[in-house]
Amino acid sequence: MAGTTLSLAGRRAVVTGGASGIGAAIARAFAGAGATVTVADRDEAAARAVAEEVGGDVWAADLSDVAALEDLSLDTDILVNNAGIQRINPVEEFVPEDWRLIHRLMLEAPFLLTRAVLPGMYERGFGRIINLSSAHGLVASPFKSAYVAAKHGLQGLTKVTALEGGPHGVTANCINPGYVRTPLVDEQVADQAASRGISEEEVLDQVFLAHSAVKRLAEPEEVATLAVWLASDAAAVATGSSYSLDGGWAAT
């Protein structure tokens, strides 16, 4: 079928949270497929290092400052909303500002960035919105009310964007990883091991992978491979969907 190539040659992409972990892997994969990548992150030095590696550009920004995004116009072919953080507490102990921070960064900012890119995408008749959701966009876990609520909201935003964007050649999809081997997850494993008095291997088996049929963490490069396909011409009719990379977690 003509045009169904995984090449991203000539495409421009913005990847938020692109300085490390999943975002950096996506930036590298996109560049490897031929795209020009803007690495967006609040850590300017780390973002610059990735951008220099992939021959891309840097956008140093704290995306939790959503007021600064309200009048933004962003010209790109592909937007990957990946930036995120985590805070863990019971509902009754959750600090309201932590709740609001997570929602600003992980739900309001993706809305505002999507709003900023759609006019140009509609004008060109092509666009790809890829939202990094989570298994927690489909299922819940205790003590993660802000994160789970934000990811569920991102699922809804993605579906609405897909319905509105389809007639204009714009697709919107979620990638829903389980636990991925990133510095953030490695830190969580170490913290859980210390707090529970068990080994990191036991934390992985008993906590992180307890509900997974495939008993290993996903690698950032595996998430990036799916992102390349979703960004390509081959995924032109893939929209409004969630693609789980969770080892079967959400199937339980």
Image (spheres, rainbow, N blue to C red):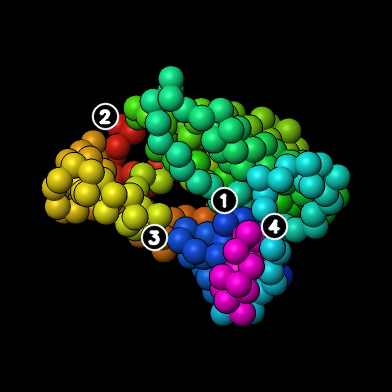
In this rendering, is residue 105 above or below 31? above
Can you see residue 63? yes
Taking the image as shown, residue 174 lies to the left or right of residue 78, namely left
- C-alpha gap between disc 1 and disc 4: 11 Å
As drawn, 142 above or below 204 = above
Residue type highlighted by circle 1: Ala
Q: Amino acid at mark 2?
A: Thr
From this view, report whether residue 235 is shown above or below residue 149. below
Crowd band around label 2 with a 10 angstrom C-alpha radius: few (<14), some (14–19), many (20+): few
> Which residue is labeled 3 in the image?
183
Cα distance, mark 1 to mark 3? 14 Å
User: What SS does tag 1 mark?
Assistant: loop
Q: Earlier in the sequence, mark 1 or mark 4?
A: 4
Span colored in magenta:
34-52
Q: Which residue is mark 4?
A: 61
Instruction: Decide which of tag 2 and tag 4 comes sooner along the chain.
Output: 4
Q: Using the image, determine if residue 134 lies above or below residue 145.
A: below
How far separated are the C-alphas under marks 2 and 1?
Answer: 27 Å
Q: Which residue is mark 2?
A: 252
**Residue at image location 39% in from the left, 25% down from the top:** 90
